[in-house]
Image (cartoon, coloured by chain):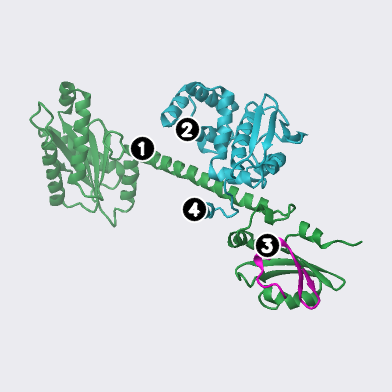
Amino acid sequence: MHGLVNRSVEAFTRATYGEDLWKRVLLRTRADPNIFLTWSDCPNRVTYSLVVAAARLVGKSMNEYLEDIGSWLTRQEQIRRLLRFSGGNYRDFLESLQDLPDRIRLVIPDLLMPDLCVVLDSADCYRIAASHHQPGFLQIIAGVLRGMADDYGSLAIIFASRNRITARVAQSEYAMKRHFSLDPSSPLRREALR
Amino acid sequence: MNIGISCLHELMPMHLVVGLDGRILSKGRTLSKLLQGNGHVSEAFRGDVGRILLQRGGGSLRSISLKSNPEISLVAHCARSGDLLIMNFGFGASLAKAARAFDLTNSDFAATDLAMEFFFLREANRAISEELNRVNRILKDAREVAERLSITDPLTGVLNKRAFDLELAAAMETRDRAPFSLMSLDLDFFKAVNDNLGHIAGDSVLMSVADALRSSLRNEDKVCRVGGDEFLAIIRNCTDRGTLLNMAERIISAIHDIRPPGFANLSVSIGISTSERCGTVHGLLSGADIALYRSKKAGGGIATIIDMP
């Protein structure tokens, strides 16, 4: 697994549950905290054991924990912005989800992740599958989809199973979108003026 | 084949249709945000751009400055169709600047435009370099700690033998310009402190001794703990007997003032050799050792300077 994945697990856990809990996760898994410094590869079992240990300590299932990581990622301003470049509204965003792995590879070529396939099942129902099974991957994506629905102000029902996600867009424009400007230095200032 | 102007509006938000007289006949919605004036190309761009484009009647032109904002330069691509000039504009390298200046959004760009990919890459790169900087900072701090640990004695904070050997070799190298002296110090009866008060008290005595050495010597002098209760010091730019004995006297008295509980006072024996008399590292060390032995033999608590190598 790419070091950035561990870094996400670390950052989410520390921000959500605090330093002490993260220290306990490290002690339980005997993981070397230095692995999170690098971009280099680290054995998958390290990543999985971190998630398992953290989920157990906070009393959540592993799937819930992964979905929470996905949603949390969309609330990190830098990441939220990168995701918002994928489309002007939530439907565009879902439909361009197939490009997301390519976009990510454009920036981090060695981050291996399955490709995503998006199929429109009915007028408002999308089915999302991965090109190959990687445990936990779709759960994180489901969390991302949930977080981005909020961000776009859409009402959507997301359901993740082992090998697919279904996203039903009940109302594409349900609430206020969060503000998004192409100029990264402007959003806060401009929102304050409104 | 007849293509309606509404198609241009739909496909090319940065288009401009100009008559041969230079009058603007149609303007894409994004370009409308950028251009001031409605009538003539010469009102829209700085310089003679309008005329050049009209004269060429086709091809491309770069670095076209806007009248509304001279800092932003566009790229134009145009073709003639009958008595119309159809132009399509792009932002080239001014893209980010233009997005900021004119508050552009996703919908201002054609779906086929790579602008969004550009913005995505720009921000992704920034995020990645921030993350790499964070990692670099952590690694740099870790390296500094490791370096400090690798040259110091963890108990007293003075140099360890390895670092001291490097200092001694360097001092030896420049002894012609900067003659120096070597002090070898050994606590008298330290074993009794350890045996009677325990190692923790012994350690705290050693820390006090290191403090006493640091404060009795000058900044440029180097102190090292060789092990146990043995210390070495390089006294820079000094081989004068009187000065050396004064320094040694200061050290003896500072260490004398450390009073471990139950002990009247602490005493130290000192042996000194100078780079003028001993020409090698080995000679310096053994000279200081011989001098130290003489101080010990005389009952301790004194300093001896070796006379001969």
Residue type for callout 2: Thr
The quarter of the picture where residue A168 lies is top right
**In front of the other: B119 or B278:** B119
Disc tally is 4
Q: Quadrant of the N terminus of chain B?
A: bottom right
Residue at 26% x, 51% y is B220
Query: Is residue B29 visible to the viewer in this orientation of the structure?
Result: yes
Residue at which label 4 appears: A192
Q: Are marks 4 and 1 in contact (CB under 8 Å)?
A: no
Residue type for callout 4: Ala
Q: Position of residue B242 (x, y in %)?
A: 12, 51
Residue at which label 2 appears: A16
| Crowding at mark 2 (Cα within 10 Å: few <14, some 14-19, many 20+) | some
| Crowding at mark 3 (Cα within 10 Å: few <14, some 14-19, many 20+) | some
Distance of mark 2 from mark 3, alpha carbons?
Answer: 42 Å
Residue type for callout 3: Gly
Residue extending furthest toward the left: B264
Distance of mark 2 from mark 4, alpha carbons?
Answer: 27 Å
Q: Position of residue B105 (x, y in %)?
A: 64, 54
Callout in the foreground (2, 4): 4
Distance of mark 3 from mark 1, alpha carbons?
Answer: 53 Å
The chain letter for the residue carrying disc 1 is B
Note whether A27 is above or below A3 in the view shown.
Answer: above
Distance of mark 1 from mark 2, alpha carbons?
Answer: 35 Å
Q: Are marks 3 and 1 in contact (CB under 8 Å)?
A: no
Q: Position of residue B193 (x, y in %)?
A: 16, 26
Residue at 86% x, 61% y is B3
The chain letter for the residue carrying disc 4 is A
